[in-house]
Image (spheres, helix red, strand yellow):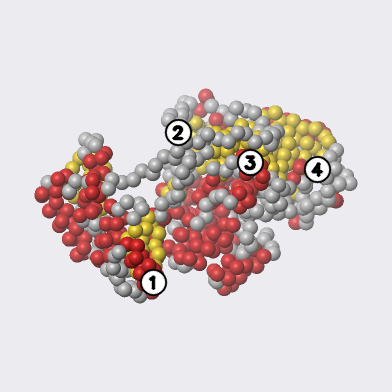
Amino acid sequence: MTSLTSLWDLQAMADFKMDNTAGIYMDYYTCPELQGFTGVIKSHSEDFIVTEVDGSGQLVCLTSCQIPPPPVVGVAKELKSRPLLSSVPPLEELVSEETVKLLQSLAEKTRTLGQPVIDPVKLGCYEEKEVRGHLHIAVRSKFPVLKTTTEKDAQGGVCVCALGDPKYPRLTEVMTPEDSEGLLTFVNTSPKDETHTLTGDYTRDQRTKIHLRLHETFGALLSTHTLTEQERKRKLSRNQTTPPPGSHISVRFRVKKRATEGSFVTKFVLRKRNIETLAAIELLSGVLDCQPSQFSCAGIKDKKAVTTQHMSVTDVSADRLSAANDHPDVAGFLETGDYAYCHASIQTGDHSGNHFTIVVRDVTVDDEVVAMAVRGVGERGFVNYFGPQRFGGGTSSARVALAMLRGEHRSAVDLILTSTTSEQGEAAEARDYYVTTGDVAGTLEKMPLYKTRERYVLKALHRHGNSDYGCVCALNSIPYTWRKLYLHGLSSLLWNYLASWRLTEYGLQPVEGDLVMGPTSADKPSVCVLSLDEVDRYTISDVVLPCVGTSSTLPANKVGGRLTEIMAALGVSLASFRMPRLGLNSSGAYRKLMAYPKQLSWRRCERPLPVPGPTAIDCGTSEGKSSGGSELADAGKSSGGSELADGGKSSGGSELADGGKSVELSFSLSKATYATVLLRELMKTST
């Protein structure tokens, strides 16, 4: 098995490669005694057909382009708002005079000490939520340097407490105490449609620091803008107020816009070719002039393949989707159809699995070898490893995640922008320029438009700088789904290592301390730790391993101890997977150790390549690049394919068109199970 010391050494992580199966710990075969065979997969996208299986067990097919009648939508719900300050009773009517004096003393201490006082003042317990809401506003309006919290006491009552607001000393570092208190009063008590102006006379450099501090402190809650004296004079004619001289900072709430009509959801079937799912979403959102976050799907499909799956999109009509089929950027890559309006978006995992039809070319072994390999996998299954496409190409998603978990935000940003050995052309030149010069603006000019993730990061760095705060903003500029995939990459890598280590240590039978799935309560799965008396009641097909997160239960045997050792060596813990600054909180999941294909069959076939093909994948060697699309693939561009070429050389489709026997495999897998991993078990080679 691959050495933990060599690959998980923190210094070695800088050169950690994710382009062979040794690097992702796929080391165990369930049928090592059976002969494998060599062949070429994904020599053309039509050689790898993936069809989603929906929740009812039906194949998802693209059958119709008919436009349904327009959806019936209602009026959008009004945004919830806090009570107006004028409707809130005075603080003296809500609490005793003695409590008001305690709050006054707490506020004075906070102002004098220049730091929040952490000893809270208990205001009392209140059952009615409305009363608690009034109390929160009354305290914060009278004493803006304080903040209020709600917590339960030992008897289960809901109590309101007050303590020093940590925002106040941070604000006074860059602005006057008067402006600091006035801003906190505005934030805590004002309606969302009001604006506030700082009255202090600040220089341009001071205003820049204030803008950055407010964004750092309040995030997306507030929007700030410097008003020149001329702009304030224009406001004078409308508002009849006397503005202070010079330029001043105006603050307003950043409120999401709501349409006058309610939202609707369009469900459709997407068939794509030679493009990864997230890249397809990015492409469609650009063509339809909407946000990628409006799209959702049950799962991410392979890149170099022809795949069919259900998708949904909010507030985009079926006729607009249909018209996008003819767009020059979409034609040849994407096709949509089978439109229907529904009330809820598709969620991740809303399918039961995928059906695969895969052509392996240039298979020269006897039929008996193939038949025995297929029979062995069908009977004994295969290790349910995460395939290479889980981890992305070039920059490892696991290394980025590790830097994020440690709070090394600058390192995470640099890893995303660092050049990779497999990349060429404009993108590689832009990365090399960044490494050499550190010039963010220049790198942004050079970075190709299809490098969406890198451009998000560069734009944020250009706006917020490369301090730790600026790097946090850069990471948060990456869409949430993509950010979370980095964490998935690391937890998947740990899972692969743990699976190989556990099978090497204990073999293909359950042992004491293993985890199995328990009863599900409130739609949340639970796990049970096997005792010695329970082992005989289970098989290896029942055993699960954790995809680590904040709430993970670890195996109560050597496997759990090994995982604890690894995470300690990496400088992370389960609690590290909660990262509020990055808006991430991965609670973890559990994954079956073994996977078993359904309806596995094979046949010999003669299938010439449609055209002299792009670069192929030679599965007869372990010296090459991982096959399949990347979950963190480059948006908008399809590569010539993912390769495992003999000796590092690519095999063109034209070389394969003349000869070689082809084998067609057909099978279904449960969701989140990788066909390339099944092929690895069949062929006894790298995927």
Q: Which residue is mark 1?
A: 230
SS of the residue under disc 3: helix
Image coords of residue 284 (percent x, y): 62, 48
Foreground: disc 1 or disc 2: 1
Residue, disc 2: 524
Residue lying at 73% horizontally and 36% vertically, measured from the top left: 357
Kindly report which numbered mark, 1 or 3, lies closer to the viewer in this rendering: 1
* Residue assigned mark 4: 361
Left or right: residue 275 compared with residue 229: right
Residue 478, compared with residue 528, is above or below; it is below
Q: Which residue is mark 3?
A: 319
Instruction: Give the mark toward the camera: 3 or 4.
Output: 3
* Residue 333 visible somewhere in the drawing: no
Q: Position of residue 125 (x, y in %)?
A: 20, 40
- Left or right: 561 as drawn, with respect to 164: right
Q: In front: 188, or 436?
A: 188
Residue ID at (59%, 61%): 15
Query: Could you tell which of marks 3 and 4 lies nearer the N-terminus?
Result: 3
Q: Report crowding for label 2: few under 14, some 14 to 19, many 20 or more residues within 10 A (C-alpha).
A: few
Q: Nearer the viewer, mark 2 or mark 3?
A: 3
Q: Is residue 442 visible?
A: yes
Q: Secondary structure at mark 4?
A: loop
